[in-house]
Structure formats: C-alpha cells, structure tokens
Image (tube, helix red, strand yellow):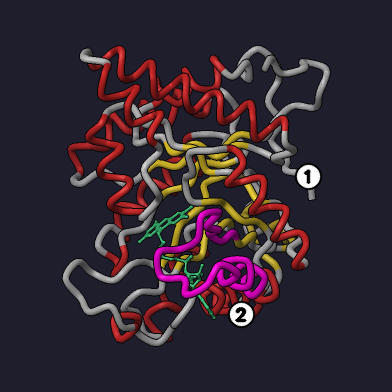
Amino acid sequence: MPIDLSTPPVPISFEVYPPRSEAGFPALHETIRRLAEVDPRFISVTYGAGGSTGGRSLQLLTHILHETHVEPLAHLTCVGNTYPGATALIREFLDAGITSFLALRGDPPTGSSEDDRFLGDLESAAQLVQLIDRVQAERSPYTEAPIPGVPGAVRVERRRRVDIAVAAFPNGHPRSRRAGDDVEALLAKQAAGATMAITQLFFHADDYLSFVQRARGAGVTMPIIPGIMPITSPARLRRVLELTGEPLPSELSIALEIEPAAEGQREVGVAHASRLVREVLAGGAPGIHLYAFNNHDTVLAVLREAGLLDRPLHKELPR
Ligand code: FAD
C-alpha cells in the first residue's frame, strides 16, 4: 500500500549497541554518521544488563551528543543494581549531558534461576522510571555555561527535564502470567512518569495495532512507538525468537529458508520490515523505531522501500 505523501512527516529513530571492544568504535561512528543524515528523532544505545557494557554505552552516547545533531537516548537497566549504585549511574549519565532514557528491568544473567532474586534493589522498570525522575529532581534546576570572550561571565539556563521511555510488549512479555499483564505494566510505567513507550519487535502489524488499542482502552495515553527489526537471515530469526520468546512467523521463516543467497535473504527481510512499517503507519503509529544491528545499510533500505526517505522526516513526536 503506497504511503500518501501529503500526510505529515514521520518521526524515525534507531537502536544501536555499544561495540564489544574499543576497536569496534570507528566503524560504528561511520554508521552513526550515516543514520544521522536522515535526521532521526533520536538514536538509542543499549545497556548490558548488570552494567557489562556501561562504559562503552556512555562513550557512544556522548559521541552521538557531541558529534551529531541527533538526540542520544540511553537504555538503563535495573538488574543486579542497588539503589545507591543505580543512583550513581543515573547521575553519571546526567552529568555527561544525557537527558533521554529508556528505563528497563533487564534480563537475568544466563543460567540464573527464574525467580526475581537476580534483580537487586529495583524490582521493575516502573521503579527505575521513578528513580530517574527523583535523581533529576534533586539536581539544581539551572545550569551555568561560560560565555566565550567574557572572562568570569556565565550564562544561566534552565536545565532540560529528562524524557523517560519504557518498553512495551505487544505479544506479551515471556514472564507475563496473564494476557492483561503487559497493558497493566505499561500503565504502571506511565503512572511512574514515563512519557513514551517503544515496543519489542513483532512480525504482524495487527499485533502492534491491537495492543495499542487495548492500551488506549486501559488509559495509556503516551505515544507507543513500534519497534521494527529487519530479519535478514534464518540464523538471525532463530536468535531473536530465542531472545524474545515471540511465536515463529511462518511466512517470513519459509521465505528466508527457501532463499539460498545471503543477498536474497536480506531482500526478504527488508521487504518484510518495510511492509510492516507501511502497515503500522497506515494504522496510526506515531513514529518508527528501527533496530539497526549497528548497520546503516539495511535500516536505510527499509525506510527507502517504505517510501519514507522521499519526503522530509519529522523529529518531534506528537504528544
Ligand atoms: P518490566 O516492565 O519491569 O516487566 C516486564 C514484564 O513483566 C511486564 O511487561 C509484565 O508482563 C511483567 N510485569 C512487570 N511488573 C508486573 C506486575 N506488577 N504485575 C504483573 N506483571 C508484571 N535489556 C537489556 O538488558 N538492555 C537493553 O538495552 C535492553 N533494551 C531493550 C529495548 C526494548 C525496546 C525492549 C522491548 C527490551 C529491551 N531489553 C533490554 C530487554 C528487557 O530488559 C527485558 O525484556 C526485560 O525482561 C523486561 O524489561 P521491562 O523493562 O519491560 O520490565
């Protein structure tokens, strides 16, 4: 279905992850530069549960902050952290100039038991939302910046309030006990102060659209941005199903399996993701968040095939 170009521009965002070592930074910086060219509303950077990638996440976020015009959005997880530890971490990110967060509970380390003892002091993402809000509220409401050429003079500015996003699960979180849990959990995160939700990947537009409808019915008013992942090989499909617990999308799975060449599989993934983009936008999605896997070519191909690079993109999300 072609997109009507007279409709308002669409806010786009991307997710990347920090490189495994310092050596991975140069290639990732080039990817960031290429993603920034399409003027996304933000680029988010994942955070290894338990702090495993914390330093490199912040390094990448500050690169986005200083080297591009794009808003960096920091994922933060609660897993395994104490209150003082989480508070210090939030302060460190705020001090570095990061003002947008995605507050997550995080997953237990592989091999840990299924109960919640792995969590540490914070038990849910909603509690982390409250903590981020509290830590920012305790800071001075003003910042001081030196005025170039005027020794000793400072410019006083009101500090920007932080934006706190949270995760949403259109097909249910693997640990949810009943169907309504995920809408209730999202409502709790909104009540705690979250202002936007980004969804787990899904394979059918109806999964997202019906979830949004249920969430609206329950009183969730914040924008719910669909998270879309181009699946470009059978191996990637297996890996994400394992990580997310999503049901197997049989049509996509068969299309990937019968295509022998890697380039052909990539085309299958791009076509599937761009169809999803068009369908969720036609259903009223307020933006598109693309899981980029630290590669710009594929996500930009998805946007191009969905017709979104032919018109100006919009940086602001409707409130
Ligand atoms: P929560 O909202 O605390 O809970 C998850 C689910 O548990 C709820 O949806 C609900 O089903 C159930 N639940 C929670 N509270 C209740 C309740 N009171 N009553 C009943 N049920 C309840 N992980 C990382 O480690 N690093 C990352 O950078 C990262 N980025 C992510 C980005 C996105 C967009 C998404 C969707 C996930 C990401 N994850 C990341 C994975 C995430 O940490 C896991 O999915 C985790 O298991 C759940 O996190 P949450 O913030 O949704 O947790």
Corner quadrant of residue 194: bottom right
Left or right of 4, for residue 113: left
Q: Which residue is mark 1?
A: 318
Front residue (pair 84, 6): 6
> What residue sits 34% from the left and 34% below the top?
294
Furthest residue in direction right, as rendered: 6
Residue 80 placement (x, y as % from top left): 31, 78
Three-letter code for the amino acid on which mark 2 is drawn: Arg
Residue 4 placement (x, y as % from top left): 77, 17
Q: Which residue is mark 2?
A: 134
Element on which disc 2 rests: helix
Q: Is residue 274 above or below residue 250?
A: above
Residue 277 placement (x, y as % from top left): 59, 29
Three-letter code for the amino acid on which mark 1 is drawn: Pro
Mark with earlier residue (1, 2): 2
Q: CA distance from mark 1 to mark 2?
A: 25 Å
Front residue (pair 117, 179): 179
Residue 220 placement (x, y as % from top left): 73, 63
Corner quadrant of residue 99: bottom right
Taking the magenta stretch, the answer to whether it contains residue 170 is: yes
In the image, the segment drawn in magenta is 165-189
Q: Which mark, by number, is residue 110?
A: none
The label nearer to you, 1 versus 2, is 1
Left or right of 46, for residue 115: left
Corner quadrant of residue 89: bottom left
Element on which disc 1 rests: loop
Disc 2: CA contacts within 10 A as few (<14), some (14-19) or many (>=20):
few
Left or right of 238, for residue 17: right
